[in-house]
Image (tube, helix red, strand yellow):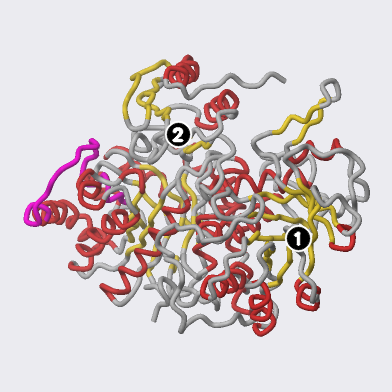
Amino acid sequence: MLQQYCPSLTSYKRLQTREIKIGDLLLGNGNPIRIQTMTTTDTMDTAATVAQTIRCIEAGAELVRITAPSKKEAEHLLVIKNELRKQGYTTPLVADIHFTPNAAEIAARIIEKVRVNPGNYVDKKKFDLIEYTDSQYLEEIDRIRERFTPLVKICKEHGTAMRIGTNHGSLSDRIMSRYGDTAIGMVESAMEFLRIARDENYHQIILSMKSSNPQVMVQAYRWLIQKMDEEFGECYPLHLGVTEAGDGEDGRIKSAIGIGTLLEDGIGDTIRVSLTEDPEFEIPVCRDIVKRYSDRELHTVIQPIEKIILPYSPFEYKRRASEETENIGAHHVPVVVADYSKKEHIVYEDLESIGYNYDAATDKWNISDGAADYIYTGDKVLDFALPGTLKVICNEQTWQDADKNKYYPLTDDNEYLAKEERIDTLHFVSVDANKEWHILLDIITKVKNDKHVVLCISSSNQHAMSSVRRFIIELMNQQVKCPVILQVSSNDNTVDEQLIHLATEAGGLFLEGMGDGIWLNSEVSQLQNDKVSGRTYLEVKSNEQFLNNTAFSILQATRTRISKTEYISCPSCGRTLFDLQETTAMIRSATSHLKGVKIAIMGCIVNGPGEMADADFGYVGSGPGKITLYKSKEVMKRNVPSEVAVAELIQLLKDSDAWIEPASV
């Protein structure tokens, strides 16, 4: 029996799914969470594709996907497979199919798995709004059945597995016309194909609900699980991924939020992290995500929730109602707290790491869009004048002698419960949601009558996100509306591990609408980049800078506070018509100062206007060396030579009043 959309909201349990076989690999039904990636080479280049596939396998990929956009690439998969087997590699291969059913039917006879996208396998996408009667809609389903059933029968005959992979950005005009641009539309798109397969008694199926927006992605998977459980009384294995996540730390954070939020609830049988980087760089990130759940079942017991009606919907975003306390809660964007408590002495230059630069010549502070709102100093009072927008949190004893206009006290939960007097100004209370339940209830009782308190909630439970969520659910059920700052601390050793830890535990709760602020901490004084083939993706100048950037990236990815340009960049593949990594870097360099603008960078028409979903502007490969530029989903310029396309994109931004000149340095 599912609880909403998963086995339990408080006890870590894997969602029970059907077991399927992909070659010799078992997936679902409690088998290990499998790791996969996709090649970026031209499928017709046998040597390059085989070499890259081997690099991915040796990095840890358990499945490798290869694009097959036409019949010739599908047929060539046999050459690639034979060469891999000749070299001793038996890892299952997956054919990536979009517009060409004939290619899927060829590939299904050759390799272990095919991936089809319901949005463009039979249907077309022209962004037309079509009014269907019920009978007309059923006729469309019959048309899909006629075209899709041959592939199902081939897969069944050859023992080939299939992924029915819905993408948010490529929903068909038919689905969009009936369900709109919604998570429910994504689910129904997949369910139509799944019903046809079940009618043929074919069950070797994996499903995915991908979006570049983690919020939409998470909601779609939850809806899908509930729908399968209601209609079939069982669930099929799930492939998790955030499509077009991008590159660098932003791509990793966005992927960790989408994938990790679901894995926290036991959802997911295989994952792929879609980065705009070489595919072997995806594998270490996948491994770091998956290993967090290797012994999660051993976590401390969390107060059950089975008999409680949830005070929020996990299928749609709505921010928890909170009361305004200074600049925290209510309508305010989530605040960011920077932790400087471990520094022995804080000087004004240290604030550069969190977005504040002092100009001695003008005696003014320059404040960036990614500037923290509060700084925690522990037992220290600063000996320099602060920028006007920055406020200080310090320990209560230190606060007694500090400037009450700039400093606010922090008390731990034990001290808070023991105190009889009340502080009649903004004050913060740190709460460990892993405490005994009766103590947490005592805290809630006291908070009810405290109009100036902000709770800073963390958990020492290994299953921390669920532990914090359970406590916030109790706040909501008891109508306690004090603001909540989410505190997450990581003692992991690498940048990837810390990004994943922080993004998953904080990001998942922001997707639930449960945060009025974010406070990240690191127990490691010197972070190290993960290195693959000698490459690093992030230069870490200081923990404060790393944590502040991570906090703002988490808020950006969860769409709760926009502070910078957002890039929706697809992972390269054999269909890509230009150098995605180089082009993404060029566009990022030219446009990274455009706060709130969403720019999609797509390698080909498959990942074109549909996959861009809610991007404001698009840069899409339309042929070798040719680019098509979009504004929203409207084509603005076709077949622009790639050598001038970035300049043309900038001109389009200017013509659309979306451009501002970058600040001089």
Q: Which residues are magenta?
A: 116-137
Q: Nearer the viewer, residue 375 or 626?
A: 375
SS under mark 1: loop
Residue 598, image x, y percentages:
48, 35
* Numbered marks: total: 2
Instruction: Check contact, mark 2 vs mark 1: CB within 8 A.
Output: no
Q: Amino acid at mark 1?
A: Asn
591 relative to 6 in the view: left or right: right
396 relative to 585 in the view: left or right: right
Residue found at the very far left of the displayed protein: 135
How far apart are the two marked residues, 2 and 1, measured between alpha carbons?
A: 34 Å
Residue behind mark 2: 600
293 relative to 600 in the view: left or right: right
- 6 shown above or below 365: below
Give neighbour class at mark 1: few <14, some 14-19, many 20+ (Cα, 10 Å): some
Residue behind mark 1: 491
For the point 61% across and 58% down, the residue is 506
User: Does any portion of residue 90 appear in the rendered image?
Assistant: no
- 463 shown above or below 160: below
Residue 118, image x, y percentages:
27, 51
Q: Earlier in the sequence, mark 2 or mark 1?
A: 1
